[in-house]
Image: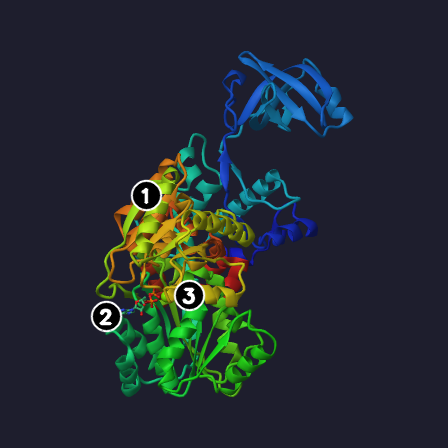
Amino acid sequence: MSSASLDQMSIRDLRGVGPQLSQKLSKIGLTSLQDLVFHLPSRYIDRTKITPIGSLQPHTDVVLEGEVRASEVVFGRRRSLVCKLQDGTGTTVLRFFHFSRAQQDRLKPGAKLRCFGEVRPGKFGLELYHPEYQHLDGANPPDLDDTLTPIYPLTEGISQIRIRDLCSQAIKAIETHGIPELLPESIKKQFSAELSYSLIDALKLIHSPPPGFELHRLATGEHPAQQRLAAEELIAHNLSLLKMRQKVQAQPAPSLPYKSEVIAHFLNQLPFKPTGAQQRVTKEISSDMEKSFPMLRLVQGDVGSGKTVVAAMAALQAIANGKQAALMAPTEILAEQHRVNFEQWFKSMNISVAWLTGKVKGKAREVQMQRIADGSAQMVIGTHALFQEAVIFNDLGLSIIDEQHRFGVHQRLALRNKGFGENQSEQESSAPHQLIMTATPIPRTLAMSAYADLDCSVIDELPPGRTPVETAVLSNLRRNDIIERVRASCIEGRQAYWVCTLIEESDVLEAQAAEVTASELQLMLPELNIGLVHGRLKPREKLEIMGAFKAGEINLLVATTVIEVGVDVPNASLMIIENAERLGLSQLHQLRGRVGRGSAKSHCVLLYNSPISANGSERLKTMRQTSDGFVIAEKDLELRGPGELLGTRQTGDMQLQIADLQRDAHLLPQIKMAAETLLNQHSKNVQPLLTRWLGNNQQYAQA
Ligand code: ADP
Ligand code: MG
């Protein structure tokens, strides 16, 4: 084994790589031999055998051999050269859109060809568009491939043939130079024995699997050789989060001791007593904030579990120590609701609250910014506008992010660095404590990966007196019955939500749909006072309507999913959700959490459009059967995958090459342990692992 290491060997050392090609390669992050070796095929094709033309199947990649029987240039929408190819079993069509005169001359009847391409259904039967082909002239046809052919993720201007050649050169290089095993035996032992591939063997197999080799398992990424690499990749990602955590916690933070008098005063004026779970989580937060390095804590608590009070107590601990606290919410409505609560709770304690959202403009904005900067605002509440460059805090001790699932990992990390931390006054470079709250219960294993940089607390108890929401799943055909039910309930003095959902991510269309529904309902329910909120209303209008609903002046509130998070009106005990089959379970759960907040029995009706798919029907059945956010999240994960659950941005940011959080979920428990062991006992392997797997994406690791 030579001492040169692969990550220091440039792609330029390979045969056939000049400055131009190496520049193109570097655009997709390929600069060293190591990068190439870990540039893994996204799929495989089988060119080891010839398929009889008579048995072609659409959408498969095949090798064909046959004789050209006819060939002509056809002038359709696009000029194309069409050749009929025949073997002993049948005839098919090869279609070329670009062809030279010379090519055309040689593709004449009688020419014998071997071609390779994807079979597609065409106007007159199956066709191959632009197949690769070679003429079979002599008596000895060239050999077929003896391994499955890998297809690599590519960039423009590099052919598969090129990259295949480079990867196979790179693999030869690891055979001579070796490649370091970065996972110690003790860690590999924790995974199933199947995964005990050496790195070289796994890579060789994946880059050039022998013919007939379990193509099926390779195609799904479940082959142990791939799983071996997936595990390593997940470990690398986990390590990057752990490193990030270390980096943040290497900064000093103000130690903020618990102030029992202040908290006691706060609790005295609350109309209820915190639940055991709220008290426990408050203690966990409180003791983090006493430390002289930044807290990084995630609070998970189902909808309605009472996270706001927990946040308020954390804020008080900062404020009682002379610091500022900031709370960021994902929507204006939610931010406004927090403002109302906090102002009410903090009024008698003479704590001043500042308010900043994108919609606070002009003079009003200047005033708020000034109060934040000079420290006269002790509690700052707003939307992500809080994190803009221009906002400068006087002395921020705690930042709280509510409903984190609405923000991506990236945003979370950006906030951590660009946000409050950097805007701190210069003389004191300490970082604020950070509290993150989410109502999307994430299955434990997934949380351990996605939030490896955070400590977790769970509020696993609902305030007393809540009765579970009874859920019915009904076809849209029963709409009139439902409208009657709304009437009956409102006449009894209860209130109801009617939620309109659209699949398009369009505020405008969604608002229109809600308007139409509202006027239709008003026609059928003339005796009710019906309100309408959607994302297109001015903030003031929205707040007025929410206020009227809260005060009981509006009986039925027609709304878009803007009410999904946080809205709190205990007298509302009936919710109708239209097109429920289109929404994710976690989102339905969030919506449903708007009812069942008072002591009256609450109901939720999920309306679907018939006919409903099997998957849709199963999802709605889950909603009917359980109100446990964790069970629902597990089911959502199973039925829709982690992208939906964490928000596409979050998983998208992770840019996993070979691992797949859902498929490989069974690996996750060991991943966390492995990452910690590496960090503590094999720290010299950590950076090489990050370079190997995150490479140029390390800005993510360092965000
Ligand atoms: P979420 O966790 O969904 O943010 P909230 O903080 O909005 O929940 O609380 C939901 C409702 O429960 C609010 O009306 C709040 O005042 C009330 N609440 C919170 N904690 C308790 C408690 N310990 N006992 C009774 N009601 C509570
Ligand atoms: Mg909340």
| Mark closer to the observer (3, 2) | 3
Q: Position of residue 501 (x, y in %)?
A: 45, 49
| Residue position for label 3 | 548
Indicate which disc residue 473 carries: 1
Could you tell me which secondary element the residue under label 1 belongs to? strand
Is there CB contact under 8 Å for labels 3 and 2? Answer: no
Residue 448 percent coordinates (x, y): 34, 60
Please name whichever residue, 630 or 423, is drawn nearer the observer in this view of the structure: 630
Residue 588, x across and y down, in percent: 37, 51
CA gap, disc 1 and disc 2: 32 Å
Cα distance in 3D space between marks 1 and 3: 29 Å
Of residues 469 and 299, which is closer to you in this image? 469
Report ligand 1 position as a quadrant: bottom left
The amino acid type, in three-letter code, at marker 2 is Thr
Judge left or right: residue 690 versus residue 23: left
Label 2 near ligand 1 (CB < 8 Å): yes
Report how far apart the C-alphas of labels 3 and 2 lie in the structure. 30 Å
Judged left or right of residue 681, residue 81 is right
| Residue that mark 2 sits on | 275
How dense is the environment of label 1, judged by Cα within 10 Å: few (below 14), some, or many (20 and up)? some
Identified by mark 3, the residue type is: Ala
Note whether residue 435 is visible.
Answer: yes
Element class at badge 3: helix
The label nearer to you, 1 versus 3, is: 3
Q: Earlier in the sequence, mark 3 or mark 2?
A: 2
Name which residue type carries label 1: Val
Q: Answer with mark 1 or mark 2, whichever residue precedes in sequence.
A: 2
